[in-house]
Image: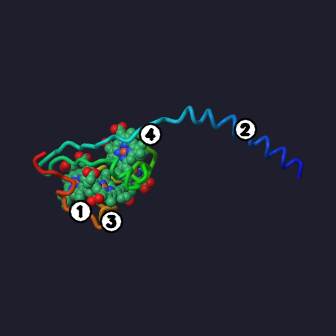
């Protein structure tokens, strides 16, 4: 019993020592007001507000599923690995998937604004 307690205290002390170090190393990133994908063709650009989504209660990691500090989706969704969807498919799966679930208009024009 005593050995258990000693071990517990030692573990707690180790944690106290490491936690502040970990906190310092954490990369702080923040959510942009507006994400804009410039139009590539007649479909036009896509623009949306992660902030609005966040305020609705969508957590950062639901979209940034490997963590927001990993940056652009295309860093990994670059079409090189057949097991990883390319970025167009990844976006459609994520965005349209939830909109469908939430019964939001999923027509192309809801996201793609022709002429922009
Ligand atoms: C509805 C989905 C969604 C939510 C929720 C969301 N984001 Fe994003 N965020 C995106 C998309 C999409 C991009 C654009 C990524 C790209 O250009 O590849 C982006 C871009 C970013 C970028 C810039 C990445 C870069 O290197 O250009 C950061 C940083 C970021 N988000 C952080 C956050 C944080 C922190 C939160 C939570 C407070 C958050 N995001 C919530 C979808 C979301
Ligand atoms: C650090 C690398 C990395 C980043 C950054 C990343 N992903 Fe992924 N993503 C993956 C990998 C690897 C998979 C496939 C394996 C899996 O499902 O985890 C995946 C799977 C997915 C899937 C599931 C596809 C399916 O088959 O159901 C979606 C949707 C997705 N990513 C969307 C996104 C979006 C949107 C972003 C940016 C906001 C993003 N990912 C950023 C690596 C990444
Ligand atoms: C977890 C669910 C969820 C995900 C993931 C999600 N959305 Fe949404 N989105 C919503 C809901 C709910 C609304 C609110 C509709 C309303 O209030 O009328 C919304 C609203 C919007 C709007 C209109 C408001 C604005 O932000 O300008 C756009 C555009 C939009 N989403 C695009 C996207 C795109 C692009 C993605 C993927 C990168 C995405 N959404 C991912 C649930 C989601
Ligand atoms: C819920 C939002 C949403 C809806 C609805 C949607 N898309 Fe997208 N789509 C996106 C996002 C986000 C991207 C990534 C933009 C980029 O990478 O430039 C994208 C990319 C694309 C691309 C590749 C980039 C380009 O501009 O050529 C094509 C093609 C595309 N979508 C076609 C469609 C079509 C066709 C429909 C309707 C059947 C549709 N999308 C509906 C969000 C949406």
Q: Which residue is mark 3?
A: 102
Q: Which residue is mark 1?
A: 106
* Residues at marks 4 and 2, CA–CA distance in whole angstroms: 26 Å
Q: Earlier in the sequence, mark 1 or mark 4?
A: 4
Q: Nearer the viewer, mark 4 or mark 3?
A: 3
Give the crowd class for mark 2: few <14, some 14-19, many >=20 residues within 10 Å.
Answer: few
Q: Residue at x 38, y 50 (%)?
A: 54
Q: Which residue is mark 2?
A: 14
Whether the residue under disc 3 has CB within 8 Å of ligand 3: yes
What element does badge 3 sit on? loop
* Residues at marks 1 and 2, CA–CA distance in whole angstroms: 51 Å
Q: Which residue is mark 4?
A: 69
Give the crowd class for mark 4: few <14, some 14-19, many >=20 residues within 10 Å.
Answer: few
Q: Nearer the viewer, mark 3 or mark 1?
A: 3
- Residue 59: where, in percent of width, then height? 43, 52
Whether the residue under disc 4 has CB within 8 Å of ligand 1: yes
Give the crowd class for mark 1: few <14, some 14-19, many >=20 residues within 10 Å.
Answer: some
* Residues at marks 3 and 1, CA–CA distance in whole angstroms: 10 Å
What element does badge 1 sit on? loop
* Residues at marks 1 and 4, CA–CA distance in whole angstroms: 29 Å
- Residue 74: where, in percent of width, then height? 33, 43
Q: Nearer the viewer, mark 2 or mark 3?
A: 3
Q: Earlier in the sequence, mark 1 or mark 2?
A: 2
């Amino acid at each position: 019993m005593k050995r258990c307690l000693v071990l517990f205290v030692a573990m707690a002390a180790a944690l106290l020592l490491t936690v502040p170090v970990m906190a310092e190393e954490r990369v702080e990133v923040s959510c942009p007001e507006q994400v804009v994908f410039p139009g590539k063709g007649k479909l036009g650009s896509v623009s949306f507000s992660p902030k609005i989504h966040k305020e609705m209660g969508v957590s950062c990691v639901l979209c940034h599923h490997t963590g927001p500090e990993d940056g652009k989706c295309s860093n990994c969704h670059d079409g090189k690995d057949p097991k990883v969807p390319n970025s167009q498919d990844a976006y459609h799966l994520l965005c349209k998937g939830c909109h469908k679930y939430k019964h939001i208009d999923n027509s192309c024009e809801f996201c793609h604004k022709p002429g922009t």
